[in-house]
Amino acid sequence: MADNNKTRALVLIADGTEEMEAVITIDVLVRAGFEVTVANTNPSTSTSESVRCSRGVRIVPDTHLSALPLPNPQDPSSYYTVLFVPGGGPGAQSMAGSTLVHQWVHAQVSKSGAILAAVCAGPTVIQAAGVAKGAQVTSHPSVRGQLEGYFQYRDDVSGKAIVVVDEAHELLTSRGPGSTFELALAIVERVKGKELMEQVRAPMMFP
């Protein structure tokens, strides 16, 4: 059984995932005291196989998603506080075609207070899972056409508003590698408050 006192995040990765989006989010959440699990979603269920990301960087995940028990409604502590889906076209396409990923997305949205977050092409995975229809989202412009008929798409985002938060669906989205810091920090602020978010942000020396 999971420890109720821990704030846990699950980051999904696959071959073709955008490495910056995955690593920036992992790093920021760890700095904020989250317990982060990185799960491989590739069709092979090896728990030790590295993932080759979009620019050739290899990441060794903590586990394969199939090795983790799906959250149990009878045990609220079995849920992750945050489920994060990075982009990278090939990685997102792989996850969008994964029944197992769909099951995890469905489990996440079934619990009140559990956050779902995605960046770049990541929202296509949420769409493929068939959840959060009509939610406000943004994404990388390259996948806008795939999302517009399903979500309430936002392309008016910039600056401090680069993260779109849909309160009703507890869904946070953003646009790409350059906006991932803001998305990760928005997750921290939402879960742990503005004061801690600012403590995490300050040493990073943003201009």
Image (cartoon, grey):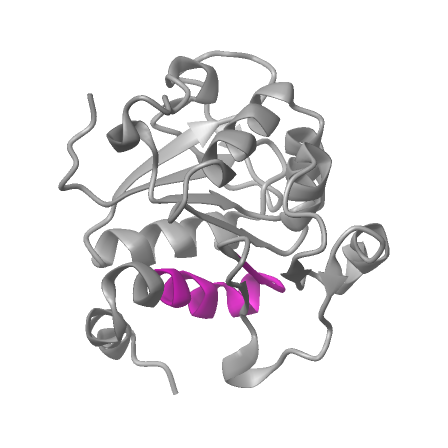
Left or right of 138, for residue 190: left
Based on the displayed image, in which of its 4 quarters is residue 5 positioned?
top left
User: Where is residue 150 shown, x and y percent of the image?
Assistant: 79, 50
The structure residue drawn at horizontal position 57% and vertical position 39%, both measured from the top left corner, is 53
Above or below for 6 versus 141? above
Above or below for 140 versus 66? below
Depth check: 166 or 196 in front?
166
Quadrant where the C terminus is found in the figure: bottom left
- The answer to whether residue 58 is seen in the rendering is no
User: Where is residue 136 shown, x and y percent of the image?
Assistant: 66, 63
Q: Is residue 186 magenta?
A: yes
Numbered label tally: 0
Based on the displayed image, in which of its 4 quarters is residue 56 positioned?
top right
Based on the displayed image, in which of its 4 quarters is residue 139 positioned?
bottom right
The structure residue drawn at horizontal position 23% and vertical position 45%, both measured from the top left corner, is 7
User: Where is residue 91 shown, x and y percent of the image?
Assistant: 64, 37
Looking at this view, name the residue that lies furthest to the bottom: 207
Quadrant where the N terminus is found in the figure: top left
- The answer to whether residue 194 is seen in the rendering is yes
Q: Is residue 173 magenta?
A: yes
The structure residue drawn at horizontal position 56% and vertical position 24%, both measured from the top left corner, is 103
Q: Main secondary structure of the magenta part?
A: helix
The structure residue drawn at horizontal position 54% and vertical position 58%, both measured from the top left corner, is 168
Left or right of 2, for residue 42: right
Left or right of 190, for residue 51: right
What is the magenta range?
A: 172-187
User: Where is residue 147 shown, x and y percent of the image?
Assistant: 78, 53
Above or below for 30 versus 198? above
